[in-house]
Image: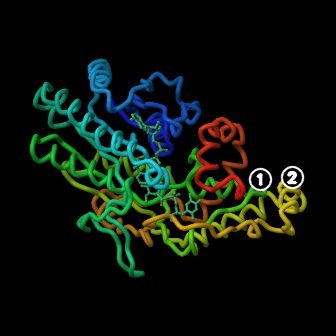
Amino acid sequence: MRILVTGGAGFIGSAVVRHIVNHTEHSVCNVDKLTYAGNLESLASVSDNERYCFHRVDICDRAALDAVFLEFRPDAIMHLAAESHVDRSIEGPAAFIETNIVGTYTLLEVARGYWSQLNDSAKDAFRFHHVSTDEVYGDLHGITDLFTETTPYAPSSPYSASKASSDHLVRAWARTYGLPTLITNCSNNYGPYHFPEKLIPLIILNALRGKALPVYGKGDQVRDWLYVEDHARALCNVLVSGKVGETYNIGGHNEKKNIDVVKKLCSILDELRPLDTVNLDARAVMRESGLDGKNYRELISHVKDRPGHDQRYAIDATKIERELGWTPDETFESGIRKTVQWYLDNPSWVARVESGEYQSWLNKQYGKGTL
Ligand code: NAD
Ligand code: DAU
């Protein structure tokens, strides 16, 4: 297959591109605008492969997309390009409306125009796979309820509302025009190459520097964590074997309270990078702030809660497990340890993504004094 991946320089998109190049025979064309969240360094291991190519294109730019479709002639689209950070959507929703809604609409129109010109067998085989989130379902308040594929949509944030809108557009293009679509809704991902604005990499990197670990509110909100490479494998499975027009929920059966995730990261770091013998610089920073500097947990700082903060997400992944035979390889224990080790081993990737723009986001979001 010739697969056009949008957002392939992002956290999940780059895992998908690496998976396709390393574990399949398919060709992949990465279409990415390279916003602050897009990093070609995440693709260094595959960028010379002859089955990989890259075009720097904004998915809102119809003419540029038309040209890429004409040149690459895809058999399938995997659409991951998006603005993805909830806190940024609260601070400035415009980019989320533009990329997640208008961009998805533009991509759907370009795909529809291209698909309608294909011969009948190519038309049947074509797939438009839209990669979405469990946040479209809103949040759960009981402790046993799960999101299924038929849970009603009830998004809470500008981000999740924009993703919900894009899901509705994809379903409308399938029903009205017959475009062969697939939708997946996944829970929180974690793993290598995760941009450090998100909880897990932010906590790892702040801890290593002896900086405060910001926990919103009480930290009792629950997220359902999935290792990113398990998600990439699930997406490829759905693309190849999923039933046209269907939705599949993807999740890792790893529900954790935020505070427990932060404490777990602290204890892994205590073991792998002890403050009193290896990370003396961080201990010195902690001591300057009046802390003992004996363990990373001392850095936990409860800060102002996220407005409209969703309480709990939890995915029922029975459908994809039963119909497509996908299950995650990583437990939370194994995946989180690999993730911490990856950040310890890749300081140069971290240094490159922490641009000036990212520093100004940190100052705006958390205040100069806190971090
Ligand atoms: P990310 O923010 O790490 O990456 C997004 C990528 O999209 C970046 O490479 C960025 O440059 C690119 N992009 C942004 N605007 C663009 C535009 N207008 N044109 C072209 N490219 C553009 O995001 P992620 O965490 O990798 O998420 C990927 C997709 O998966 C998103 O659609 C997100 O909603 C969805 N998702 C994410 C998670 C998660 O936990 N991260 C979970 C479920 C679903
Ligand atoms: O559920 C899937 C979604 O998961 C994806 O659709 C989003 O793109 C992705 O960003 C993620 O959204 P979250 O808002 O759940 O992820 P984030 O890492 O921003 O936050 C995880 C939890 O940790 C959330 O409850 C907020 C909390 N948090 C986050 C940050 C950045 C903190 O307590 N402190 C922080 O500094």
Quadrant the C terminus occupies = bottom right
Marks 2 and 1: CB-CB under 8 Å?
A: yes
- Whether ligand 2 has any atom under 8 Å from the Cβ at mark 1 is answered as no
Instruction: Identify the residue at horizontal 71%, vertical 64% (top origin).
Output: 268
| Residue 230, horizontal then vertical, whole percent | 47, 53
Q: Is residue 299 above or below residue 170?
A: below
| Residue 347, horizontal then vertical, whole percent | 72, 42
Q: What's the residue type where badge 2 is placed?
A: Asp
Q: Is residue 117 above or below residue 89?
A: above
Closest to the observer, 116 or 318: 116
Q: Which residue is mark 1?
A: 209
Q: What's the residue type where badge 1 is placed?
A: Arg
Q: Secondary structure at mark 2?
A: helix
Quadrant the N terminus occupies = top left
The local crowd at label 2, few if under 14, some if 14 to 19, many if 20 or more residues have their Cα within 10 Å, is some
For this view, does 203 lie left or right of residue 270?
Answer: left
Label disc, if present, on residue 281 of the rendered structure: 2
For this view, does 236 lie left or right of residue 228?
Answer: left
Q: Spatial distance from mark 2 to mark 1, Cα to Cα? A: 7 Å
Label disc, if present, on residue 41 of the rendered structure: none
The local crowd at label 1, few if under 14, some if 14 to 19, many if 20 or more residues have their Cα within 10 Å, is some
Q: Earlier in the sequence, mark 2 or mark 1?
A: 1
Q: Is residue 145 above or below residue 318?
A: below
Please say which color scheme the image uses. rainbow
Instruction: Identify the residue at horizontal 34%, vertical 48% (top origin).
Output: 131
Q: Is residue 141 above or below residue 67?
A: below
Closest to the observer, 279 or 123: 279
| Residue 297, horizontal then vertical, whole percent | 74, 69
Instruction: Identify the residue at horizontal 77%, vertical 69% (top origin).
Output: 298
- Whether ligand 2 has any atom under 8 Å from the Cβ at mark 2 is answered as no
